[in-house]
Amino acid sequence: MNANDTRHPATLSYEQAGVNYDLIDPLKVAAQRAAAATGAHLAAHGFSEVAASRGESAYVVDVGPFYIASIVECLGSKALVADEMSQLTGKSYYDGIAQDTIAMAINDLITVGATPLVVQAYWAAGGSDWFGDAQRAQALVAGWKRACDVCNVAWGGGETPALAGIVEAGRIDLAASCTGLINPKERLSVGDQLAPGDAIVLLASSGIHANGLSLARKLVERLPQGYLTEVQPGLTYGDALLAPTVLYSPVTEALYQAGITPRYCANITGHGWRKLLRHPGAFTYRIHSVPEVTPVLRFIQQHARQDDREAYSTLNMGAGFALFVKAEDAARTVQVAQAQGVAALVAGTVEAGAKQLVIEPLGITFGTDDLQLR
């Protein structure tokens, strides 16, 4: 099937795949408002919260000599793709799935300037039988440890419940929590110093990462060979989807060693490039260069018949993480990232003006109404 095939002319959106952020985001906002009232409890322990971290990707507590940051994230439905591909190929993909799960937490934690310190695991299966598949279970353990080693974090422990009746039989729900330190305190990155003239550096993604999988799985219904349809010669759709998420903490740690402190960061996950609007301030983010789109994401866009606006509002489209840095640090930031094996691009600038993201090469503008996370 090629991109001009008209047998399935309708656009396939993320909402049609079962994910509607218009329904989810109001709950997030309500939860944040309720949670904000609990921050006062920290005073009883002699601590305080960093108020600016409310609504960010990680929560920060001031404990005196340094800050503590924490986050919990779940993998989502990417494990379902691994299960389907295992049935088709006989391979276990859970080493990569483990990295995806840890990346979901660590890539959020580092947005506030934290060094990841400890990871905890939550592996909830639909029954005890899931853990009886030794190849799969060992792959999960090995991949989890390897990702911890890459990020120099301790794996502190975890929980492995069997939740028959809650989790579907034969399936597993994976999540990770992560705690980190912001030390020295000057490494804190919650956007209070973001200013017009700052540069936007985008770090390359490895593919779909772990967001947009509901859409990717729904698209299988349109493909002539399902997950075994080739994205490019020698690479199936299923294998391309299962490329592990990039772990970006080696880059942020290397930036610190190089004397570069980002003004702000955004993990480009759910909401796609709209995440570049996450900062609560009124700035215009003008993108003059876009990274190359990974083949699997271009394939999804073409076969789901999405225009650029729909695709960039849902998928990472080749950019997995955004660093907002002083203009004089932009070129060096790219060099540091590339030295860690992660491609990077000086993609744009921060300007004074209305809150909007302007992707000039594509003629796309996202405004304040396109992202409501606070």
Image: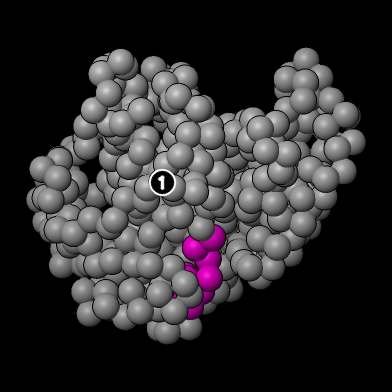
The one of 265 and 139 positioned closer to us in this rendering: 139
Q: At x 51% / y 27%, what residue is drawn?
A: 226
Q: Amino acid at mark 1?
A: Gln
Name the quadrant containing residue 122: top right
Is the N terminus in the top left, top right, bottom left or bottom right quadrant?
top left
Q: At x 82% / y 38%, what residue is drawn?
A: 160
Q: At x 12% / y 51%, what residue is drawn?
A: 361
Residue 248 x, y percent position in the rendering: 49, 63
Is the C terminus in the top left, top right, bottom left or bottom right quadrant?
top left
Q: Residue furthest bottom?
A: 258
Highlighted range, magenta: 247-256
Residue 213 x, y percent position in the rendering: 49, 33
The one of 154 and 64 positioned closer to us in this rendering: 154
Name the quadrant containing residue 63: bottom right
Residue 55: tell me if it is visible: no
Please give the residue where the numbered disc 1 appears in the rendered image: 232
Residue 246: tell me if it is visible: yes
**70 sits to left or right of 133:** left
**133 sits to left or right of 80:** right
Is label 1 in a helix, a strand or a loop? Answer: strand
205 to 101, vertically: above or below: below
